[in-house]
């Protein structure tokens, strides 16, 4: 995984070519657009949140999710795999995964500790390509923005997007 | 005043190789220490010269010599070092004057770069002479640095910006340019060479047309001065701006050429030391040009280094540089059009050695990363020229931009890198 070439592996290339959950939802409750102004990439994430299963909004689950946009393979495959990973998850579970993904992308996640990264681990090599970290995390920023009813987000919105706080908005 | 014996006389920065008409590329490359680097285990193939060029040993040595033996502040003290530094700084101004064939050395103003030079014209000329309802003509091919200052002026003065369109090859539509003129047209800003596409614009013809209507013209020469002989008297441009770091010089330095009469009519841009003759709290009298526009301590070493860079380029000969780069462009274009799925953006008949391209199924950022893994440095993105990208309905391109020290073998490395990236995505 330390060889940056390993990042362009089968699973990422497959999701780039055939992105899952690509398009729009017939019925959406949440929505956000993410931009990377430095490279012009943009990702549009739509959600349909179900009724709360547990306590309050944190217990709401993602019943449906879709994305579309114009982006590089790293960004598009990250978005595609993200939609698969968070579908059916509660809001709080999704926020945990967002934080874990951002930590992994910036090399801060300890794989020895408990985590929910699973198949998303194919992106762990991105930490060796610092200029491409923003590509991988843009969909996750955008999902966070959608969950928190922010219409727009940008990788340049925070002082240092690689270390942006993705806690409660 | 005396000179100190320990300060070596400045040697003109002469390249090791001077072989006309063809360039001895291997000997030229030996002048550039950075070109010996390995990147990701591969020899560096540096094709991002439109963003910034590399520096030859002769310029690096000049900077070391200046800092080691000559540095002091200029235009101030009576001591020997200050005199030496002042002389070197003014000698650099004369080198730049001759490099662009300006009539007088006072027409060369040191700025921090092209962006600073354009902002100087906007503040010094635009804010004094452009008013409500006036029109400024720009082109689709401009870099953001020749758009945004004029938008700021237009907003402040309620002026209007008119834009010259381009055809599908990325060439300015000169008929449309001419039709934009009316009695409200007060200024033209045009890039000599497009940074995103490489198009060489017919600036001499455009300037003549504007002058026939009494309209001054600023030429952004950031992408032209490093690649071709520039003669500001022949062009008859009113202003010409370029940066040192794209011309084998240091960052933080560039020049604005302006016709003396225009510069004299302009208001100062920045206030401070050096740009004044006398200061009281009642009245300040500004210095004469070029000093009126050089407030504060300039980047002295960088200016002297830029002087060494133009010595270096002139010794190789700008026409020989242009000829070699044209050969690189022709070879690279020929190779690239043969690659299935690769599309050149910008196919002007008159082009600098810039190849902007897109590849079916491979996003420019992935192309940039995969080329970098092969040691090939290119730029990806919108190249600070978003209107160009909008014109071609693209979010980004990959751009390979050549310099005189690039070789035909490096074109082959680029082509091989593109093919390897296509294979990854096949």
Image (tube, coloured by chain):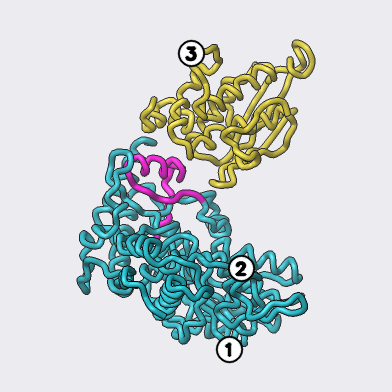
Chain colours: A yellow, B cyan
The quadrant of the picture occupied by the C terminus of chain B is top left
Is residue B391 visible in the rendered image? The answer is yes
- Please identify, in this view, whether the residue under mark 2 or under mark 1 is nearer the observer: 2
Check the residue under mark 3 and report the chain it is in: A
Q: CA distance from mark 3 to mark 1?
A: 75 Å
Please rate how many residues cluster around mark 2, counting C-alpha atoms within 10 Å: few if below 14, some from 14 to 19, many from 20: many
Looking at the picture, does residue B179 appear above or below residue A137? below
On residue B119, the disc is 2
What residue would you read off at disc 1? Answer: B212
Please rate how many residues cluster around mark 3, counting C-alpha atoms within 10 Å: few if below 14, some from 14 to 19, many from 20: few
On residue A112, the disc is 3
* Residue drawn at 53 percent across, 37 percent down: A135
Q: Can residue B355 be found in the magenta stretch?
A: yes
Q: Report helix, strand or loop for mark 1.
A: loop
Which badge, 2 or 1, is on the more N-terminal residue? Answer: 2
- 2 and 3 marks in contact (CB < 8 Å): no
Foreground residue among B242 and A124: B242
* Residue drawn at 79 percent across, 16 percent down: A56
Check the residue under mark 1 and report the chain it is in: B
Same chain under badges 3 and 1? The reply is no
- Please identify, in this view, whether the residue under mark 3 or under mark 1 is nearer the observer: 3
B85 on left or right of B143:
left
A137 on left or right of B46:
right
Q: Report helix, strand or loop for mark 3.
A: loop
Is residue B172 visible in the rendered image? The answer is no
Provide residue B302's location: percent of width, then percent of height.
Answer: 44, 64
């Amino acid at each position: 995984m330390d060889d940056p070439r390993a990042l362009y592996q089968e699973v990422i290339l497959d999701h780039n070519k055939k992105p899952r959950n690509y398009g729009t939802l017939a019925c959406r409750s949440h929505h956000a657009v993410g931009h990377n102004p430095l490279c012009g990439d943009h990702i549009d994430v739509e959600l349909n949140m179900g009724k709360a299963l547990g306590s309050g909004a944190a217990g709401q689950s993602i019943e449906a999710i879709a994305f579309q946009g114009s982006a590089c393979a790293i960004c598009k495959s990250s978005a595609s795999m993200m939609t698969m990973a968070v579908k059916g998850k509660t809001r709080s579970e999704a926020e945990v995964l967002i934080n874990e993904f951002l930590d992994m992308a910036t090399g801060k996640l300890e794989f020895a500790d408990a985590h929910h990264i699973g198949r998303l681990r194919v992106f762990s090599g991105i930490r060796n390509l610092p200029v491409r970290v923003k590509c991988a995390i843009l969909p996750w920023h955008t999902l966070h923005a959608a969950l928190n009813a922010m219409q727009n987000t940008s990788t340049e919105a925070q002082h240092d997007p690689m270390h942006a706080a993705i806690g409660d908005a | 005043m005396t000179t100190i014996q320990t300060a070596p006389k400045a040697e003109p920065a002469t390249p090791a190789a001077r072989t006309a008409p063809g360039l001895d590329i291997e000997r030229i490359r030996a002048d550039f220490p950075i070109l010996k680097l390995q990147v990701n285990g591969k020899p560096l193939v540096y094709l991002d010269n439109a963003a910034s060029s590399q520096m030859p040993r002769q310029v690096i040595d000049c900077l070391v010599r200046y800092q080691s033996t000559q540095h002091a502040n200029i235009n101030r003290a009576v001591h020997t070092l200050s005199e030496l530094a002042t002389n070197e700084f003014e000698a650099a101004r004369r080198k730049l004057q001759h490099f662009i064939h300006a009539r007088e050395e006072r027409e060369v103003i040191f700025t921090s770069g092209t962006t600073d030079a354009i902002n100087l014209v906007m503040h010094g000329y635009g804010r004094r002479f452009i008013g409500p309802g006036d029109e400024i003509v720009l082109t689709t091919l401009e870099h953001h640095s020749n758009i945004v200052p004029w938008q700021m002026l237009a907003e402040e003065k309620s002026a209007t910006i008119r834009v010259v369109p381009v055809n599908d090859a990325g060439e300015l539509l000169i008929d449309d340019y001419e039709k934009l003129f009316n009695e409200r047209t007060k200024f033209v800003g045009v890039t000599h060479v497009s940074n995103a596409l490489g198009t060489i614009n017919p600036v001499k013809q455009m300037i003549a047309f504007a002058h026939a209507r009494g309209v001054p013209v600023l030429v952004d020469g950031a992408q032209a001065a490093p690649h071709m002989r520039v003669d500001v008297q022949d062009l008859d441009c009113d202003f010409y701006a370029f940066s040192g770091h794209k011309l084998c010089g240091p960052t933080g330095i560039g020049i604005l050429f302006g016709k003396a009469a225009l510069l004299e009519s302009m208001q100062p841009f920045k206030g401070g030391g050096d740009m004044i003759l006398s200061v009281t709290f009642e009245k300040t009298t500004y210095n004469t040009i070029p000093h009126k526009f050089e407030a504060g301590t300039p980047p002295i070493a960088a200016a002297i280094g830029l002087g060494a860079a133009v010595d270096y380029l002139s010794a190789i000969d700008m026409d020989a540089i242009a000829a070699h780069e044209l050969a690189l462009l022709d070879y690279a274009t020929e190779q690239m059009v043969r690659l299935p799925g690769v599309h050149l953006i910008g196919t002007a008949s008159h082009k600098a050695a810039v190849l902007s391209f897109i590849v079916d199924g491979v996003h420019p950022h992935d192309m940039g990363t995969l080329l970098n893994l092969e040691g090939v440095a290119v730029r990806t993105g919108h190249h600070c020229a978003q209107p160009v990208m909008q014109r071609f309905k693209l979010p980004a391109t990959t751009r390979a931009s050549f310099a005189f020290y690039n070789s035909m073998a490096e074109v082959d490395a680029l082509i091989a890198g593109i093919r390897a990236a296509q294979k990854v995505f096949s």
